[in-house]
Image (spheres, rainbow, N blue to C red):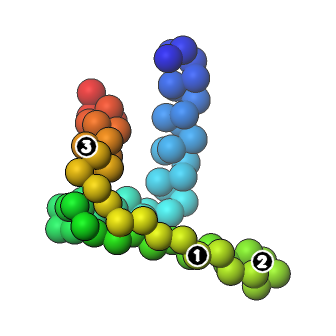
Amino acid sequence: MNPMIFMQIKERMDIFNSEHPKLARFLSVVKSNALKEGTVIEMKVTAPDGEEYVSNIRLTANDIETINMMSSMGHN
């Protein structure tokens, strides 16, 4: 990955985390307690006009492996 793009992504993530501090704590708790095969993750998005979009996935062993790999990238 281009180092400049990586730095830009890190800057944007720092801004996102400072504007939404509860999300990082929530994800940390989920990772520690509920990130296992069979867990269902549901996402609901409500647009400004009130339209709602909902979807969910049931985590597989492959999903857990991918999430753990992505998580470890941030700890290097």
Seen from the viewer's position, the closer of residues 68 and 29 is: 68
- Residue beneath the point at 54% across and 34% down: 9
Reply above or below: 55 against 74: below
Assign a secondary structure to mark 1: strand
Q: Which amino acid does label 3 sit on?
A: Glu
Q: Which of marks 3 and 1 is nearer the N terminus?
A: 1
Q: Name the residue under label 3.
A: 65
Q: From the top left corner, tell me how far across and down residue 57 is, in percent.
A: 42, 65
Q: Quote the CA–CA distance across marks 3 and 2.
A: 35 Å
Which mark is nearer the camera, 2 or 1? 1
Q: Mark 2 points at which residue?
A: 48
Left or right: where 33 falls relative to 48: left
Q: From the top left corner, tell me how far across and down residue 17 is, in percent.
A: 47, 54
Q: What residue type is labelled 2?
A: Pro
Q: What residue type is labelled 1?
A: Val
Assign a secondary structure to mark 3: helix
Q: Quote the CA–CA distance across marks 3 and 1.
A: 25 Å
CB contact under 8 Å: marks 3 and 2: no
- Residue beneath the point at 51% across and 44% down: 13
Q: Mark 1 points at which residue?
A: 54
Find the residue positioned furthest to the top. Answer: 2
Q: Earlier in the sequence, mark 2 or mark 1?
A: 2
Q: Quote the CA–CA distance across marks 2 and 1.
A: 15 Å
